Amino acid sequence: MEVWRTRPDMFVKGLVERAHSTIIFDRYPENERFSQACMDAMRSRMHISHLQYAAWSQAATLFEELDNKGLNTSTSVMKAIKTDRELLGRVAAMVCHVLELQRWWCGKIPQVLTSCKAIRPYFIRKRLPTGSAIVIKDTAYCNRHPPKDKSIEFVLAGLYETTKSVLPAPSHLREIHKAIQNPKEAEKFTAEAYDTIGDYAIAVEFTDGFTQSSFGQDLTALVKEAIQDGSSKSWFPFLSGMGQEKVTEVDDEPHVNRFGSVESLVKVQALEWLSVCFAIDAKLAVTLMVTTDTWGWMEYDILWRTVDQILWQEAENLECAPGRLAKLFGLFDPQDKNRPTAGEAFLRELSRLIDVADELFRPETVPDQPFVSSIPVATPQDSVAKAPERGSFEPKVKVKKKKAKAGQSTEPPPPPPPQAQPVEVPEGDELDENFPELLPKNWKLNKRTVDVSHPSTSTV
């Protein structure tokens, strides 16, 4: 229900799918049939969604409480409900609400399955003046075009042969399951058909555990005993959210009402709420949404706010205590600021997309690195200027040389002078005019200059 109010695209798509399977009265002209089918589909979907909420919310709450009490087995639960009549009433109410949901899904299955394109010609689909929709086999068409043996048309034709055909039971679903094992037969069903079968099967599996098992037999006996001694009258708040004057007991056949008058109260409540849902007329708005694109989320929110106001007001007129029926069916308070809307969902999604875009297009930033100077930092011992180191730290000692004999030299022969290397000058460059062309061969540097500039005392 929340998705319908926040996702217009999903709501419209589902509405169109359901409209194709909805059976409407023959009195509507051809140009109005589709828009009327969409309106009836919206009403029907709202009604069954409220029944779903009533059934599964009660089941979830009750199972959680049983688990908190340590009642995790059928034996322990049965032992508890035999001594606690209030707990018995809550279990019975839960089962009755799921049984009612199962009945409504059962009624939808013929409409949905026979609406599929390949199957539809084999059946007559119409709505009676009483409002009931019927689906029966078109005998004349089947005689002209006999369905193949074991095909899905063949199975459904046998299921809906007359107006008094038995509604789809689990055994019939098994026959349908066998037929759709053939891929060609499975393709004849739409996605809506499979969804409807699945919803119905879930309800059937749940209720069978409380009616067909040994636990279900004992539960049925305890409920009938409570009805006979009158203690079941205290269960009314669990069974119905409407006032007692709004609902009356209905005596149905035993195979339909397993829990007698207790179950009939839930059935009458569902029928009463159906009349509320079908009294809503939003045909113009629904037609506009389905057939055009000239509306936005603001118009969509106005539509659902109006619908919620009608449902809330009708619930106040029917409920036995303030807020009880609205809580049972999961209605949205039109005055609630946190009520889900398409506008809020749109802005939330837009904000998410903006955040994603910021992440995708945000420039990459390099983390800050510590500053490193390109100038070497002097260590404490190097912080004082000093002269270049000498070649040796030993003190100079003057060595006396012996006098050489006559004709002998005391000094080693001088090394050969270095050969002058030619200097290549790049094109376009000229030598400095003041630079001397030749240097003296024995030009000696001052001793002080030699000591400071270089440890060697050789001459140039």
Image (cartoon, rainbow, N blue to C red):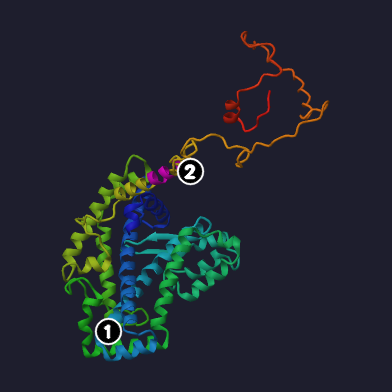
Nearer to me, 301 or 41: 301
User: Where are the magenta residues, as a range?
Assistant: 353-361
Q: Label 2 amino acid?
A: Gln
User: Mark 1 against mark 2, which lies toward the viewer?
Assistant: 2
What's the residue at 54%, 70% (across, down)? Answer: 177
Q: What element does badge 2 sit on?
A: helix
Residue 42: image location, x then y, percent: 33, 56
Does the magenta portion include 354? Answer: yes
Q: Where is mark 1, residue-wise?
A: 87
Q: What element does badge 1 sit on?
A: helix
Q: Residues within 10 Å of mark 2 (few under 14, many from 20)?
A: few
Q: Label 1 amino acid?
A: Leu
Give how far apart the Cα atoms at labels 1 and 2 are.
Answer: 93 Å
Nearer to me, 311 or 371: 371
Mark identifier at residue 191: none
Q: Is 98 drawn above or below residue 35 in the view shown?
A: below
